Image (cartoon, rainbow, N blue to C red):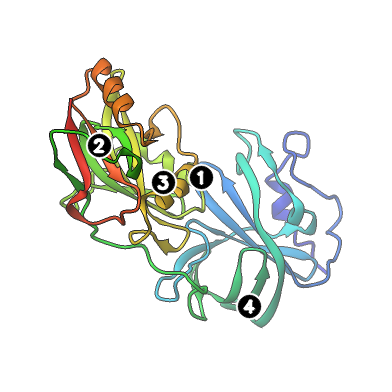
Amino acid sequence: MADRLVDYRRKRDPEKTPEPVPRQRGRPGRGDTFVIQEHHARALHWDLRLERDGVLVSWAVPKGLPPDPKVNHLAVHTEDHPMEYASFEGEIPAGEYGGGQVRIWDRGTYETEKWSDREVKFVLHGERSEGRYVLFRTRGKNWMIHRMDGPAPGWEPMPAGVSPMTPVRRARLPRNPGRYAFEFAWEGRRGLAAVEGGRLTLRDPAGEDITERWLRPLGGELGSRSALLDGVIAEVEGVEVYVVFDLLYAEGRALLAEPFDRRRSLLEELGIGGARWQTAPSFPGEGAAVRAAARERGLPAVIAKRRDSPYIPGESDAWLCIPI
């Protein structure tokens, strides 16, 4: 039988990459192994690999598996990989083929329903992926991947066209500060950032795309985690920074009806922090202290957010803007 790993070996130098580069054709597995690897190469993508005839037949999927049968995703057929690659995680050196970090995103077993040169139907049984999919060839190495059954239980699409929630002005702090979380009022361009498949799009309140090139890497930082973020592009120490203060969608679930405390907790779990993006600090019940700190920093106001309030598009008295 022909050696199906010739192309794989030709592209890799075992002296320079930690990837497995077996001399032999490859050891056979059980015939039903699959792995999905998150690959932070020049462009973030996910590698879907299905065991077939002793190798891992592979596709690079730029946006990951589609969660919705209404949307297909591009899948680019790549060279077969050795079975040893099913357990590979590591950093491929810069300058080498596929340079970047590789992490196992999911793995498990699969069932083959159909396999031909133009169409592959299969059922995944993974730790994160369950369901029926079909890969179908469109042109050359380009294929598409389609989810054949319904969305995963509980999954819902990301809300579109959401208007930002805005505060009403009040002269004084609320009398019951324990019911509120207090934040600094950030001045700048308001924007909702939609992140799916590692790609980020920032839109202003009118729905216009205002995505800056420097902000796009935040999508890659979140990886496979889908999110709809609310924040503002503010100038911090002379540098534009996207300051995030709310989370409206995460991991296939809309959060607009959730209370602020719950949304805030999920936002903090995302761990958004860096030189050009950060999570805004929030202080439950600390109205007077936050107002004093804002005055020292020369900020114009503080925002009081009722902790039990859902996200209400448009102006709402659940959020209060109190000038210094």
> Which residue is the site of mark 4?
122
Mark toward the viewer: 4 or 1: 1
Residue 315 picture location, percent across and down: 15, 51
Could you tell which of marks 2 and 3 lies nearer the N-terminus? 3
Q: CA distance from mark 1 to mark 2?
A: 22 Å
Could you tell which of marks 2 and 4 lies nearer the N-terminus? 4
Quarter holding the N terminus? bottom right
Residue 115 picture location, percent across and down: 65, 80
Could you classify mark 1 by the number of other residues whose Cα lies within 10 Å: few (under 14), some (14-19), or many (20 or more)? few
Could you tell which of marks 1 and 2 lies nearer the N-terminus? 1
Q: CA distance from mark 4 to mark 3?
A: 39 Å
Give the structural element (helix, strand or loop) at label 4.
Answer: strand
Contact (Cβ within 8 Å) of mark 4 with mark 1: no
> Which residue is the site of mark 1?
269
Could you classify mark 2 by the number of other residues whose Cα lies within 10 Å: few (under 14), some (14-19), or many (20 or more)? many
Label 1 is placed on what type of residue?
Answer: Glu
Could you classify mark 3 by the number of other residues whose Cα lies within 10 Å: few (under 14), some (14-19), or many (20 or more)? some
Give the structural element (helix, strand or loop) at label 3.
Answer: helix
The numbered mark at residue 264 is: 3
Label 2 is placed on what type of residue?
Answer: Ile
> Which residue is the site of mark 2?
303
Quarter holding residue 287: top left
Residue 129 picture location, percent across and down: 61, 67
Mark toward the viewer: 2 or 4: 2
* Depth check, front residue: 43 or 4: 43
Mark toward the viewer: 1 or 3: 3
Give the structural element (helix, strand or loop) at label 1.
Answer: helix
Is residue 43 something that shows in the picture?
Answer: no
